Amino acid sequence: CKAGTKVRVWAEASDSSQPFRPALRGELGDRPRTSTYVDWVMEADWKWAAEAIESADISDVISEVISRPGWRSGGSITLVMKQENRARVAGKTGPPCSMFSADYGLYYAPKLRIEMQSSQLASIPESNACHITVAVGTKPLVGKCEATLSAVAAIASSSDLQQTEVVLKEAFPVERKEYTFPDAWDFCTRQGVRLCTRQEILGDVDDPEVFFEADVPSDWNIFVPYLNFRSLGDVAWNWWLGVHPDIVGDTMRATAKETEFIPCCGTIEHPPYMAIDGDVETSWNAAAFDSSPSLTVDLGKGKAAVNHVQIHWTAGYATEYMVDGSTDGQVWSAPVHVMHADGGLDEISFLEDIGPVQFLRIRMMELGGSGESYGIKEVRAYGCSLDPVVVNQTETSLFTVKKSLTPVITSVEPTRGTTAGGTDVTIKGNFFTSDAALLEVSFGRFPCAIQTVTVVSAEHVIECVTGASGVLFGGDKYVIVSSREYGSTVPTPNATYTYIDAWSARTTWGGSAPPTGCGSWFDDPGCTDTVVIPEGQVVLVDTSLPRFYLILIQGKLVFDRVDIQISATYILVQGGTLEIGTELEPYEQNAKITLYGHPKSIDLPTFGTKVIACFECTLDIHGKPQIAWTMLDGTTAPGATEITVQEAVAWPVGSKIVIATTDFESPRSSHSEVATVTALSNFGKTISLGDIGVCSGYTDSGIPFNCTRRSFLTWPHLGETRTIEGRDLQFRAEVGLLTRNIVIEGDYDERLCPL
């Protein structure tokens, strides 16, 4: 948009907006709009990338929506924008506004950031006044307590890279060498940003701006890569820009030369606040170049005594880090040093409460895991608020709250059911009445028809029948019980219900039987039977499946907590989710995914064959937590039938393990041995072995041959400490668990790969 362009902003006039469906062209424009709108006049030209554009105040538009009688907390709002005019440019009508959409690519689509400010109403009409009795303690909490302490801000050590309010515009010094464009693109991507555009480097003037601060000789050419959005059809061209400090104009040219700087622009995709937003699906990621970052969490001006902290790490976690506290963010005390951490969820307890503090700091020292940089999904602090609470303040006397008079849900059973509705659900809690006429139950925005309300052991029990949500509106919903006299329950994680369709149910397939799939790969290799899980649908795989050519997941496919086997040539997760267990609730059963296909197949270019392909998707796969590797606690001699390891393990009987060689290894031979666990003793530290495989050699491609099975070990394996020149050195064989409860494998086809 050019300066002077007017864009009119409405909201959809509904209690909760439905998801936007790009396939239905014009669908958004046909939705009812609020009577209130705001005209937003552009004060400056829009930039193609990397700069935020702030709208006019749209609070009046939002207020009309949330003032609707049917509006509830958690509802969705759709904003509708329409260009009302075209600005005049050089006496002529300027171009229309344009932007990349999410359909084109999430990376280039504009990101919506909403700023909210709380304010007190100067006066409220008597007719709208709320009279609710409040009883709040006036003394601060003391002693040990487990209150969740809310964080109000998070700040990362690399402040020039972690400010989400400003655009990152930085030239990174790199080793002077010739870079390809993909090299430069990948470099910026590792910082969490992207290459700059020509406009961002040069601005709108003819003379190039000095993009970085450096003492550069006037005769030294500086070559930097940049991203050019000039497109031919659907092709975006990537160029190199040659810039001489003293010469401009015709000397600029597309070229590839040595460079000492790479310019990166954009906002941070994973800013610090994502570590305190209460959502483990989001995360803060440190810049890749920051080898020792820190994350500081602000608990607010009301100081607190902290007794323990939870840290949920991403794939890139700290194996060594420190946690300390501060009242002012300057002087730090009571550090806790954590070593040998293994990622996942860390819980740090303090011998004595840290407090009173306003800030907690996590200093990372050693990177572990598979991520290229440190990342934290969520930081949660627990302890005691030290601020006294005062009641009956003049400005808040109109609204009072009493927890004992708030409806509470204690349990929901069952917690899931079909989108077709008709599931009987029991809800227990305190709702202050057993009169069904005074109560309403909803799962998200879908009603649950109350059948009976009884009192059992001083607890209210509601029996209700779910309404249909429709197959495209599945997923987790908050359970809300509303009382005409006492208001509604607060949405909580322990009061949720999941609309989910079982694979084996006819309702999942519109009343038809579940898909039959293909025959065996050997007998029916040309079968193209395909299953599509559309966006919005959640399907529970509650039984093993026949083989399919393609399983396309645009919604969500969840493995039930039973043993499951599925087979396919391709599994394409396109914007959807494949879930086999979660980080908090790992999958404890056995799952096997077998993939088929010819190695020269071109049916799915780019991704290849025998593949689970992910395009802007979520793969949530968490198997049974196990110690995967340990070491021998003592040397074993040839003929041994059991080993002793340093750590207690719980490896299932029948699982395969490997005992690494400590005496001989070559490309064509190895003294490593694979064995089957037959029993565990000595509290999991002694492992009895059987069916031990020994192979005399290996081919060039690593395939073993001349293998025999024995009941005892053939080779010695060290497990001891030796002192050499005054230093203790460990000489121990690694022992690894080979068996996994989640297996993703390629099918062995003897016609393609004969023995």
Image (cartoon, rainbow, N blue to C red):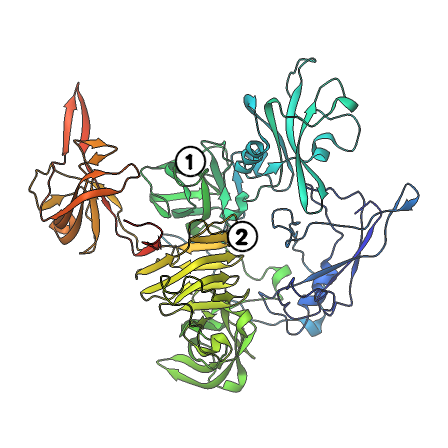
Dot 2 corresponds to which residue?
616
Q: Amino acid at mark 1?
A: Met
Q: Nearer the viewer, mark 1 or mark 2?
A: 2
- Give the farthest residue toward the right: 91
Find numbered disc 1 in the image and state the secondary structure of the residue it sits on. strand
Q: Hey, which quadrant is residue 454 in on the image?
A: bottom left
Q: How many marks?
A: 2
As drawn, the label of residue 364 is 1
Spatial CA span between label 1 and label 2: 29 Å
> Dot 2: few (<14), some (14–19), or many (≥20) neighbours within 10 Å?
few
Left or right? Give the position of 517 relative to 158.
Answer: left
**Quadrant assignment, res 658:** top left
* First in sequence: mark 1 vs mark 2: 1
Looking at the picture, does residue 374 appear above or below residue 751?
A: above
Does 7 sit left or right of 508 as displayed? right
Q: Is residue 17 left or right of residue 719?
A: right
Of 440 and 632, which appears nearest the observer?
Answer: 632
Q: Compared with residue 666, is residue 645 higher up or lower down, i.e. above or below? A: below
Query: Image point 35% across, 61% down: which residue?
Result: 522
Identified by mark 2, the residue type is Glu
Q: Answer few, some or many: residues within 10 Å of disc 1's Cα (few below 14, many 20 plus, some between 14 and 19).
A: many
Would residue 334 be found to the left or right of residue 101 on screen?
Answer: left
Residue 447 location in percent, x, y? 54, 78
The image quadrant that residue 91 belongs to is top right
Q: Is residue 68 visible?
A: yes
Residue 510 rendering spot, x and y as whole percentages: 51, 77
